[in-house]
Amino acid sequence: MSLTDSTASPEKINRTPAWKRIRWSSDLAILVYIGCATIAVHAFTGGRYGFHRDELATLDDARHLAWGYVAYPPITPFFGRISLILFGASLPGFRFFAALADAAAVVLTGLMARDLGGRRGAQIVAAVATIPFGLAAGSLMQYVSFDYFFWVLTAYFVIRLLKSNDPRWWLAIGCAIGLGMMSKYAIPFLVAGLLAGLLLSDNRRYLASKWLWCGAAISLLIFLPNLLWQVSHHFVSIEFLRSIHARDVRIGRTQGFLPGQIQLTLLAAPLWIAGLFACLFSRSWKSFRSLAWMYLTPLALFLILKGRNYYMAGAYPMLYAAGSVWGEKLLFPVQRGRAAVVRVAAWTALLLDIAVVTALALPTAPIGSKWWTVALKMDGDLREEFGWRELVETIASVRDSLPPPDRAHLAILAGNYGEAGAVDLYGPRYGLPAAVSAVNSYWMRGYGDPAPETLIVLGLPLDFLQSHFASCQLVGHTWNRYGVENEETLDHPDVFVCRGLRQSWPAFWSSFRYYG
């Protein structure tokens, strides 16, 4: 070979750095770019308002790592702890892993479309269809994002199983299900759909595979630490879930479940409906019939059990993928002009969904503007991101007004986890003690040693306090500098100082427990 030969030797090719061999314009790369774009949106908008009350509870649990919590399994606080280590108490940093989980779901949806036979266009359409929910869910650090991701990951592995006929994919499915159980106790509904799909389709042969049982064993092994925690705590999360479900039914949060599915998917609804139709009725999709039952079974179960509409969010990406591929194949023989019209309409709908969610579900609206007013009407959760610093400032000023003997044995009794989390986050800069509360996992941490003698109390009604304390004095009100009306300012705005518990602290604390 001459020195001028342009053919590179194998040795030279192998010496090329891996990053130089990456195809930056490949289908996978495009999907990754789309996912990264959603993370960038969260990075630019995530710090505009403040912590949501649910995030304050997660943040506090992240400082008390355990294999379980009353309100959720351990994965969300675990990633919260990593966020605290990497970014401190930065709001965008705390939300990073939730945004990352939703971005990964975007990529997986595109990959599902690829495995179903879709070309680049179908992959991108499927991925983009998932962005609106991902943006809304990833705007807060809560278990919704991680539960959603593991539903999508399970569906992706199931598609790999059905496409390859390789039963070893049951090991990956087992891992995804086990981790899903460590995120939220909702993935069994998807598992029920998977089993129904295997039984009601030509995929029954997979039920006899030893790899299925190996996958089930892996799933149980992953979930085992939390299961043991539940055993040691008398399955407290079941009691919690019953209480929360009864509350949701009572106040109407479970109403309109079926119409809520259209609200959940917005203008992308025709896409998942097409995917469901293809999986359920098309002969060419016979091997993927199980996907339809992985959707229909959880839908029926949540409808019967009165679930909230967003519980189904993780079941839609696989249908987006199927609908995109089915639509692509349907349009292929159509005249170019007609196909172009359909594509323009589809892209207009998907981009409009993204624009609406960005405007109304993310913290983008200028506070006090007309845009802001509309956003609050559409998404009430935005209200709960205000007033936490001011709440702690008020508590600190009350503490400073107390005589020294009262400060010596002082506790802050919070009625809900938002108040308790705010005190624990912002209180140290004022020298405040950690909050005590009877809600969820806070109750397990107790009331301190020695027991308090004077309490600053917020979030609890006066008649309850008067029945348990010798004296209670109204000393302040909650507020926020933007004048936003939310749960703190409307439902329980009063701050009290109470003294003289009428019974012993152990007796009081044993009966003073509730869920929220």
Image (cartoon, rainbow, N blue to C red):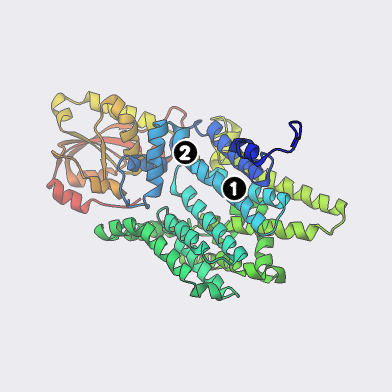
Residue identified by numbered label 2: 95
Q: Residue at the location (32% across, 28% down)?
A: 394
The number of numbered badges drawn on the structure is 2
Q: What kind of residue is marked 1?
A: Val
Please tell me how crowded label 1 is: few (under 14), some (14-19), or many (20+) other residues with Cα within 10 Å: many
Q: Is residue 401 left or right of residue 504?
A: right
Regarding mark 2 in the picture, which secondary structure is present there? Answer: loop
Q: Residue at the location (51% across, 46% down)?
A: 101
Q: Residue at the location (86% across, 52% down)?
A: 336
* Image location (x, y in percent) of residue 114: 66, 54
Residue identified by numbered label 1: 106
| Quadrant of res 376 | top right
In the image, 75 versus 385, the foreground residue is: 75
Marks 2 and 1, how far apart in space?
Answer: 17 Å
Marker disc for residue 210: none
Is residue 343 at all visible to an observer of this figure? yes
Regarding mark 1 in the picture, which secondary structure is present there? Answer: helix
Q: Is residue 469 left or right of residue 125?
A: left
Q: What kind of residue is marked 2?
A: Arg
